[in-house]
Amino acid sequence: MSHTDPHSNRTRLIDQLAQESAAGVRPFALAPLLTVWWLLSWVFVVTMTLLTGSLRPGWQDQLAGSLRFSIETGLGIAAGLLLCIAAFRSAVPGPHQRRWTGAALMLALLWIGSFVMGLAAPTFETAVIGARPGCEQQVLLFGLPAMLAGLWLMRRGYVLNWPLAGAAIGLAAGFIPATLMLVACWYQPQHILGFHIFPALLLGLGGGMLGLGLQWLDSRRP
Amino acid sequence: MTCTDSASSADTRPNDEVRWSTWMVEAQQGDQESYRKLLTSLANAITAYLRVKFGNIDFLEDCVQECLLAIHQGRHTYQCSKPFRPWMFAVVRHKAIDMLRHRARRPQGESMDDDSNHLENSRVVPDQSEELMVREEFFIGLPNHFREALVLTRVIGLSVREAADHTGVTEAAMKVRVHRALKALRKLLDEVDAF
């Protein structure tokens, strides 16, 4: 029966970790990374959207003329931004992480809820003007690189709850093309829910699954 | 204001907070001595914290060392403009719960003697769980049925089925009880003001 002194083990571990720390570390720059990801993702999605089609004719007038449409668009942008903040914040340990994600999810639900409400009383009369073929695939395809880039950047931090963080960045990435489709595709609440928001939710699910995988990878890290 | 200025001028914060923050900032710049001092001080604080929250569990030292490793791996995420303790306790809380959640059942016949800080409870039988709970003050802030579930499955090392048989509840109910106990423990670990 061999007993090892736990404190000598601890001292050895501390010595080893101190030796490893000699090179120093570059602090994780949360705000700049988050800002760069958000802006570049928008630039990427807008560019891809414009390369694959045009925006709906008269979208500027609709945005300026309808408060409700402006609120819907603003809510989409705000929900995506809050999800992005929640996701990147989760790469830095600290209190109230779940509250941030909870608040972001509430805003996302509010945004989705506005279109559910629109099923009964839509903002605009249904007109297929501006319809974009394959918009649902485009939401997935444009959001996917943004999501993967986000996960890659978040891995530079120290994420404690990967599934939640992955779902948040997946949703944030999906909400960017889904919001843009409000002006790049035809306006009809049922279509928006099924072809713009549903693929964005799928990206959230995919992000959560990837997060699970990353958690598993981290648990195997020596 | 640089990080070093901010850490040294924050004299309104508790002593530990200022020292830990200063040492961490210096450690991030590669100061080994500061890092050694930081980890030694944190190890003592984490031991005290976990002993109060968990009781005298046999894997306390493992838990402390896992927390130190996690702090090491995530040290680049500490931002000097933010308080140190919430950052550190978020890591500790996560690691401690993670260890409890994934603590596998001890294989039959394996001795616990190799465990550091062990309880000498290799002869503990489930019937003694109540006495053990009181003597070692396991998970003292939790309701009794949660404490019992954790002691049986995570300290004594019974399977969920054995723990369920012992307490006279169904296996599913025991699973739920362990899950809820871990959730309650996570909340309990949020109370770090005393440390």
Image: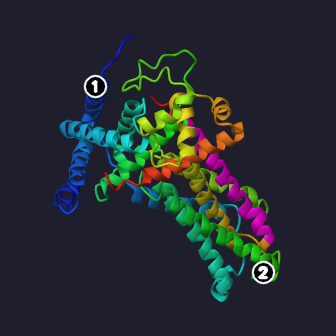
Determine the chain carrying the residue at label 1. A
Q: State the quadrant of the N terminus of chain B.
A: bottom left
Q: Which residue is mark 1?
A: A12
Q: Amino acid at mark 2?
A: Pro
Q: Is residue B104 visible in this depiction of the protein?
A: no
Q: Is residue A107 visible?
A: yes
Chain-order first, disc 2 or disc 1: 1
**Mark on residue A122?**
2
B45 vs A69, nearest the viewer: B45
Distance between mark 2 and mark 1 Cα atoms: 67 Å
Decide: is A203 above or below B152.
below
Quadrant of the rendered image containing residue A142: bottom right
Q: Quadrant of residue B146?
A: top right
* Secondary structure mostly seen in the magenta stretch: helix
Is residue A100 located in the magenta-colored stretch of the structure?
A: no
Evaluate if marks 2 and 1 touch, with contact meaning CB atoms under 8 Å apart: no
Chain letter of mark 2 equals A
Q: Amino acid at mark 1?
A: Arg
Farthest residue to the bottom: give it.
A65
**Residue B115, x across and y down, in percent:** 41, 22
Viewer-proximal residue among B115 and B67: B115
Residue segment shown in magenta: A190-216
Q: What residue is rendered at 51% in x and 59% in y?
A: A86
Number of other residues with Cα within 10 Å of mark 1, as a class: few under 14, some 14 to 19, many 20 or more = few
**B49 lies left or right of A161:** left
Residue A178 in the image: state x and y as whole percent: 67, 65
* B47 in relation to B1, above or below: above
Residue shown at 28% from the left, 27% from the top: A7
Secondary element under disc 1, as helix, strand or loop, is: helix
